[in-house]
């Protein structure tokens, strides 16, 4: 097993039956009902909600996920024991929630029971994390813990004062800067509710409608299957918020079709990985990391979702164009007519599934919290399901949805718990300020060099990590650098969020590529390289909106429209340059020229963008006319 594979090696997800199956389903359904209740009707304090949620999810994770990757069908005795200890420790914290909320950090001493409970929950968290999200993230958390406890032995700027074990436990567990902080708060509310919404929509065949809609719209065109992958993965991704889950779900259909029609396995996998990764950037549902951004910065999620509209379009535009150019260049056709559902029939059968997304968007625009908006969307899904017998949900189906949602949340909760422990460690050691010093040492006070370093570091921090953990690490460590450079909060945070998402497809670790490799039967590194090529324009987009906030809908309508048009032309030029094809193969000088012009069109100086657009337009027209002349000469 390679080192990269080892980083993603998680415990086997058990297919439980009999008594263990009934217990885990009941526990999962109970968690789902509790989250719904606490988000809408409960007056319980936030800390108690987080503690009760997390301890129960811990118990569930030990029953669902085996300690090794070997197939298992029933929990071991040790798993039942760990599950029981999780509930006991959680009960202790829940019983003392008021005391924890009122205590003064580092002033009120920890009792012996406090220390034992805190140590136990950290150890339980590490084991659950190892099973659910793999050794890579677990190793990072252990590294931070070691740095907290033994960093005083490190000489120089990155050393810190001696931290006693009691100090470490106090900050990590008994404050909102540690385990029971922002990431788990998001997991226990917004993130869980949207996963529940997605599970319900999928059970009602909503995901089938989105796939059929993508097929009806693009199936006949050149490279139809790849375009179906781009559109359906984006639509499914905005529901799931997980690139890996998206790849497994939609890629199981699109990748084999692409291979059958002539696409190389590495390219087919790359298309699916790139498109699935972008789902986390597509509003109205953008996954746990976006909710963490809202909670961490205090910016309403509605504003984040609105700001994400243009960047999401700019992410998918060059991918779609590259897929089209590759298909035309290699002569790949679309699907056969008998393989394509009719558009009118598709809309007639499934247009109601658009209503839940409209309900969520309406809730956010009206100023309701993401939690309430998700509940509104869930209610609309349940109402829509009653309209046809094939989608109607029985009580057992609803029970199954509740249980499945909790099971799907296990890796997300593991990632959020890891992020909480890391935040606690950074808070104790002052690592964020030291990191800022390091970036300024590398880049000086040069704004452009500093943001390039910030982008590279964000991707490196995200290698092998779930997006929520990658983003929160970047937000804590790197955002102070961007603030010191005078960049506004939303553009700076969205910049980090964007690159945290992109780390899922960036080699050598590329989490989503490993998910696609099993389906495409291809080396994950080859898939990751193709995914980067396909989404190369997307790596430029964050720099564009960081320096031109009109692309985040911050500006006059004219500024927004002009900036958007120039950005579209610029990214189209980059896509054409990457494929080296536009009506005909392009020479290397033309490719280099188009790439440079594409970058210039993203510069926030309209005179520069206009000149670049004019030159690029002349190249487009020249290529088009020469292509027409060649076709005439051939006929």
Image (tube, rainbow, N blue to C red):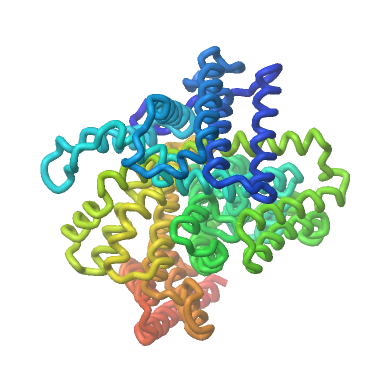
Residue 230 horizontal side relative to residue 176, left or right: right
Judge whether residue 12 can be spotted in this image: no
Query: Observer-nearest residue: 77 or 89?
Result: 89
Q: Is residue 524 above or below residue 60?
A: below
Q: Is residue 273 above or below residue 139?
A: below
The percent coordinates of residue 94 (x first, y second) are 54, 34
Q: Residue at x 49, y 78 (%)?
A: 565
The percent coordinates of residue 461 (x first, y second) are 33, 47
Query: Observer-nearest residue: 571 or 482?
Result: 482
- Residue 485 in which image quadrant: bottom left
Residue 355 horizontal side relative to residue 282, left or right: right
Q: Give the quadrant of the C terminus.
A: bottom right
Q: Which residue ends up furthest to the top in the rendered image?
A: 77
Q: Residue at x 57, y 48 (%)?
A: 191
Q: Is residue 225 above or below residue 629?
A: above
Query: Observer-nearest residue: 182 or 242?
Result: 182
The percent coordinates of residue 79 (x first, y second) are 53, 18
Q: Is residue 298 above or below residue 387?
A: below
The percent coordinates of residue 95 (x first, y second) are 54, 33
Query: Observer-nearest residue: 287 or 433?
Result: 433
Q: Which residue ends up furthest to the left in the rendered image?
A: 155
Q: Residue at x 15, y 35 (%)?
A: 153
Q: How many marks?
A: 0
Judge whether residue 139 can be spotted in this image: yes
Q: Give the quadrant of the N terminus.
A: top left
């Amino acid at each position: 097993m390679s080192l990269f594979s080892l980083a993603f090696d998680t415990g086997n997800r058990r297919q439980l039956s009999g008594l263990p199956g009934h217990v885990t389903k009941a526990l999962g359904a109970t968690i789902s009902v509790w989250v719904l209740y606490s988000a809408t009707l409960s007056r319980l304090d936030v800390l108690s909600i987080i503690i009760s949620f997390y301890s129960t999810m811990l118990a569930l994770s030990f029953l669902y996920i085996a300690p090794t990757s070997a197939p298992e069908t029933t929990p071991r005795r040790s798993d039942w024991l760990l599950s029981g200890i999780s509930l006991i420790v959680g009960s202790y914290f829940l019983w003392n929630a008021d005391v924890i909320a009122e205590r003064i950090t580092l002033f009120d001493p920890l009792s012996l029971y406090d220390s034992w409970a805190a140590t136990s929950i950290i150890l339980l968290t590490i084991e659950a994390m190892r099973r659910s999200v793999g050794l890579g993230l677990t190793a990072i958390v252990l590294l931070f813990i070691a740095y907290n406890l033994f960093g005083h032995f490190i000489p120089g700027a990155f050393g810190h004062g001696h931290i006693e074990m009691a100090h470490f436990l106090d900050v990590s567990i008994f404050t909102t800067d540690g385990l029971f902080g922002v990431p788990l708060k998001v997991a226990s509310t917004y993130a869980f509710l949207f996963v529940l919404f997605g599970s319900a929509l999928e059970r009602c065949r909503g995901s089938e409608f989105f796939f059929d809609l993508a097929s009806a719209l693009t199936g006949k065109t050149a490279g139809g299957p790849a375009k179906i992958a781009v559109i359906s993965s984006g639509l499914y991704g905005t529901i799931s918020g997980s690139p890996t889950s998206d790849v497994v779900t939609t890629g199981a259909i699109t990748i084999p079709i692409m291979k059958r029609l002539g696409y190389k396995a590495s390219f087919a996998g790359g298309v699916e990985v790139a498109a699935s990764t972008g789902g986390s950037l597509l509003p109205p549902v953008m996954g746990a990391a976006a909710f963490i951004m809202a909670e961490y910065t205090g910016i309403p999620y509605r504003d984040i979702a609105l700001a994400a509209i243009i960047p999401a379009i700019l992410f998918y535009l060059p991918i779609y164009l590259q897929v089209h150019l590759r298909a035309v260049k290699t002569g790949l056709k679309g699907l056969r007519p008998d393989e394509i559902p009719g558009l009118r029939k598709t809309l007639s059968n499934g247009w109601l599934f658009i209503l839940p997304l409209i309900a969520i968007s309406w809730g956010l625009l009206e100023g309701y919290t993401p939690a309430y908006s998700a509940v509104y969307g869930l209610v609309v899904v349940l109402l829509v399901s009653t309209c046809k017998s094939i989608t109607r949900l029985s009580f057992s189906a609803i029970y199954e949805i509740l249980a499945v949602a909790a099971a799907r949340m296990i890796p997300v909760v593991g990632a959020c718990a890891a992020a909480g422990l890391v935040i606690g460690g950074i808070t104790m050691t002052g690592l964020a300020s030291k990191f800022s010093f390091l970036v300024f040492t590398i880049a000086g006070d040069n704004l452009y060099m500093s943001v390039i370093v910030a982008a590279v570091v964000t991707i490196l921090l995200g290698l092998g990590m779930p997006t929520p953990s990658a983003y929160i690490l970047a937000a804590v460590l790197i955002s102070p650098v961007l603030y010191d450079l005078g960049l506004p909060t939303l553009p700076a945070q969205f910049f980090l969020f964007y690159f945290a998402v992109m780390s899922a497809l960036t080699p050598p670790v590329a989490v989503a590529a490993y998910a696609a490799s099993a389906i495409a039967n291809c080396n994950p590194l080859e898939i990751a390289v193709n995914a980067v090529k396909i989404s190369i324009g997307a790596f430029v987009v964050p720099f564009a909106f960081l320096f031109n906030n009109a692309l985040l809908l911050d500006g006059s309508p004219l500024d927004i429209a002009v900036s958007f048009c120039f950005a579209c032309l610029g990214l189209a030029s980059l896509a054409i340059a990457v494929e080296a094809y536009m009506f005909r193969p392009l020479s290397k000088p033309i490719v280099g020229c188009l790439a440079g012009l594409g970058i210039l069109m993203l510069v926030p100086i309209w005179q520069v963008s206009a000149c670049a657009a004019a030159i690029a337009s002349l190249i487009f027209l020249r290529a088009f006319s020469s292509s027409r002349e060649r076709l005439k000469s051939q006929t």
